[in-house]
Image (cartoon, helix red, strand yellow):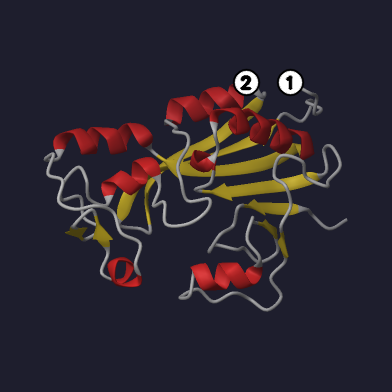
Amino acid sequence: MKKIRLNVACGGRPLKGYINIDMDSLSKLKKRYPNKNFSKDLLLKNWNVFKLPLKDNSVDEINSDAFIEHLSFVEEHKFFKEMIRVMKPGGKITLSTTDFEKIVKIWLKLKDNWLDFYRVDNKAIKEKHWFGTYTYDYKNRWGYIIASIFGSQNGDGQYHKNCYTKKKLISICKFFNLKVISTKNYKWQGNRDPMIKIIAKKNIKFKSQII
């Protein structure tokens, strides 16, 4: 039987061999990420992540990269419940998100030097305008670092509504009886934004239940 693997809220990072799920259509994703090459055989679904059209205990693997911080406090619980519902016992889930604790510590050390209002015009986006600071480097509290806390906010679904630490993610896994396999700290795009990645497995003896 072919394995079912989900890539939840894929955005500009669809994965081959996965059912890629996103709120946007392929045409919208191409417009949002003009520098990305999307495979012709990409499998993309606009499924509701809180009510997937999949049976209980049917999914082998779930990947969700930089998505959970976009969930509200109420949506957070719904999302995790649904992921646990569809996962097979022994199935794996990989989650990554902004390391809120590290970001805030960096933010507190920067100068409170506000320069300009946020802009979303094409020129501003092209020139990396972040509140008057033209760089991805952490130059002041109101530069690019603020997007790591609140999201870029330049389109639907871009707002950050939630925050995570490594300890919180481990606690959530324990809440749902998931066994944490590994945790990792890394940087977004390889050179900026502290991130956390956690991999966990569903207990083989565990069957999905409403929690």
- Assess whether mark 1 and mark 2 are in contact (beta carbons under 8 angstroms): yes
Looking at the rendering, in which quadrant would you find the N terminus?
bottom right
Marks 2 and 1, Cα distance to the nearest angstrom? Answer: 10 Å
Q: Amino acid at mark 2?
A: Phe
Q: Name the disc covering residue 36, or none.
A: none
Image height of 83 relative to 120, above or below: above
Q: Tell me which residue sits at (63%, 76%) in the image.
A: 39
Judging by the rendered image, the residue that carries numbered circle 1 is: 211
Q: Earlier in the sequence, mark 2 or mark 1?
A: 2
| Residue 117 shown left or right of residue 88 in the figure | left
Secondary structure under the numbered disc 1 in the rendered image = loop
Badge 2, how many Cα within 10 Å: few under 14, some, many 20+? few
| Number of marks in picture | 2
Image quarter of residue 202: top right
**Residue 72 in the image, given as x and y percentages of width and height:** 54, 34
**Residue 191 in the image, given as x and y percentages of width and height:** 30, 57
Q: Amino acid at mark 1?
A: Ile
**Residue 81 in the image, given as x and y percentages of width and height:** 70, 30
Image height of 95 relative to 31, above or below: above
Looking at the rendering, in which quadrant would you find the C terminus?
top right
Secondary structure under the numbered disc 2 in the rendered image = helix
**Residue 142 in the image, given as x and y percentages of width and height:** 22, 46
Badge 1, how many Cα within 10 Å: few under 14, some, many 20+? few
Image height of 11 relative to 140, above or below: below
Image quarter of residue 28: bottom right
Q: Tell me which residue sits at (23%, 53%) in the image.
A: 131
Viewer-nearest of labels 2 and 1? 1
Judging by the rendered image, the residue that carries numbered circle 2 is: 175
> In this view of the protein, which residue sits in the foreground, 89 or 62?
62
| Residue 65 shown left or right of residue 50 in the figure | left
Q: Tell me which residue sits at (21%, 61%) in the image.
A: 135
Image quarter of residue 126: bottom left
